[in-house]
């Protein structure tokens, strides 16, 4: 939000644009936070059960960890479906709208920007300088305006103050100046006439504002919905083109991102379950680090190499998913085995040692055996 405020204020755009840009960034950040939030939720739940020995009690009653994971997988199936809608349909449109608003701010589509204290060529034949501008009232001080005509004549206007606005379609700049002077200069540079005024209204034509590109043009595959990507990839007439690889990589990424949710419970349990007497605070940190590294590699390496056609997505992207599954399963089995071993050792330590009382049959047999 701070970066957006700095950007909009530097471009002299309206402040309410910041909230529209933030709203269009929500799907992007949600696609990053949703897997991490799901992982942390499952991991912390099983860690609390493990540290309080409730997990041991459930296992003793016949509820295995695999059985406890059934409702977790059911919930993550729902999250995976929502994530598919998010990255496949909502996020592409939001990204395009964000880029469009950013373009409108820089191009002047949301209002012309005139830096204070600088000479600005608003057109090829109009130069303006504003001493200071009140952002709230749009009132300017120390206005200088030079207009050039086709035959070489110039008109110079200076004013102590004035209001600045534009037409609704931003095709013209409207100036309502007060207490100023107007000078007319011929092509030879000689002043021909001067005019003092108390108020003077002027309309200056502005150049046409450039229009933003259409959504998904060129290699902007991340702005296309899943249906559009699928249509593009299956089009045999563009197979092998530079942008075709970008669309193919985006197709595999859109499928892989929701599938990651089905692996999260395995890694979460592996990092959450631990022995009560051998609890480690490093395991949750290691789990978060593994998940972040996987997502960074998938997006910054797997998707990039597949989009450039340097490597097949089945190697760069699906290979990463297979490696992530393998590491998660390996950590899961190791964590469960250590938790079981710790539980058995704890039971052995807690067993009561019974010694036979003196004079009893068992005590006499123990004494005779010791004497022999």
Image: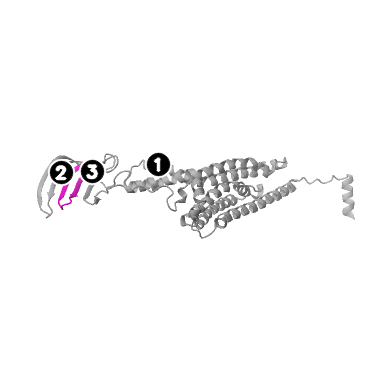
In the image, which disc is placed on residue 140? 3
Left or right of 245 on screen, residue 167: left
On the image, numbered disc 1 is attached to which residue? Answer: 20
On the image, numbered disc 2 is attached to which residue? Answer: 180
Q: Mark 2 falls on what kind of element?
A: strand
Q: Nearer the viewer, residue 191 or 275?
A: 191
- Image coordinates of residue 299 in percent, x first then y, are 51, 53
Q: Mark 3 falls on what kind of element?
A: strand
Give the residue at x 47% y 47%. Answer: 224
- Image coordinates of residue 66 in percent, x first then y, are 67, 44
Q: Nearer the viewer, residue 60 or 256?
A: 256
In the image, which disc is placed on residue 29? none
Label 1 packing within 10 angstroms: few (<14), some (14-19), many (20+): few
- The answer to whether one can see residue 343 in this image is yes
Left or right of 6 on screen, residue 223: right
Secondary structure mostly seen in the magenta stretch? strand
- Image coordinates of residue 185 in percent, x first then y, are 12, 51
Left or right of 349 on screen, residue 302: left
């Amino acid at each position: 939000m701070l970066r957006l405020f700095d950007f909009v204020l530097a471009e002299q755009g309206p402040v309410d644009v910041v909230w529209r840009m933030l709203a269009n960034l929500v799907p992007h950040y949600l696609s990053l936070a949703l897997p991490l939030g799901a992982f942390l939720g499952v991991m912390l739940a099983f860690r609390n059960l493990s540290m309080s020995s409730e997990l041991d009690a459930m296992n003793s009653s016949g509820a295995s960890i695999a059985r406890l994971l059934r409702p977790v997988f059911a919930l993550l199936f729902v999250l995976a479906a929502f994530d598919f809608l998010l990255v496949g349909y909502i996020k592409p449109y939001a990204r395009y709208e964000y880029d469009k608003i950013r373009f409108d701010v820089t191009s002047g589509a949301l209002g012309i920007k005139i830096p204070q204290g600088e000479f600005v060529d608003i057109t090829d034949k109009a130069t303006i300088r504003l001493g200071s501008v009140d952002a709230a009232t749009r009132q300017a001080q120390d206005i200088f305006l030079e207009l050039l005509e086709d035959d070489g004549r110039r008109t110079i206007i200076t004013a102590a103050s004035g209001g600045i606005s534009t037409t609704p379609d931003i095709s013209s700049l409207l100036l309502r100046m007060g207490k100023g002077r107007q000078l007319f200069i011929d092509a030879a540079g000689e002043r021909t006439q001067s005019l003092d005024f108390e108020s003077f209204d002027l309309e200056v034509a502005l150049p046409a504002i450039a229009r933003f590109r259409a959504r998904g043009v060129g290699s902007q595959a991340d702005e296309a919905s899943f249906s559009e990507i699928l249509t593009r990839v299956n089009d045999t007439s563009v197979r092998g083109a530079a942008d075709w690889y970008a669309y193919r990589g985006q197709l595999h990424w859109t499928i892989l991102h929701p599938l990651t949710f089905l692996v999260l419970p395995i890694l979460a349990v592996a990092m959450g379950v631990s022995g009560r007497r051998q609890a480690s605070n490093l395991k949750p940190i290691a789990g978060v680090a593994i998940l972040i590294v996987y997502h960074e590699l998938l997006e910054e390496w797997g998707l990039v190499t597949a989009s450039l056609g340097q490597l097949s997505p089945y190697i760069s992207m699906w290979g990463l998913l297979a490696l992530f599954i393998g590491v998660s399963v390996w950590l899961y089995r190791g964590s469960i085995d250590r938790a079981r071993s710790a539980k058995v050792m704890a039971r052995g330590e807690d067993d009561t040692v019974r010694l036979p009382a003196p004079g009893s049959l068992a005590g006499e047999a123990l004494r005779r055996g010791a004497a022999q």
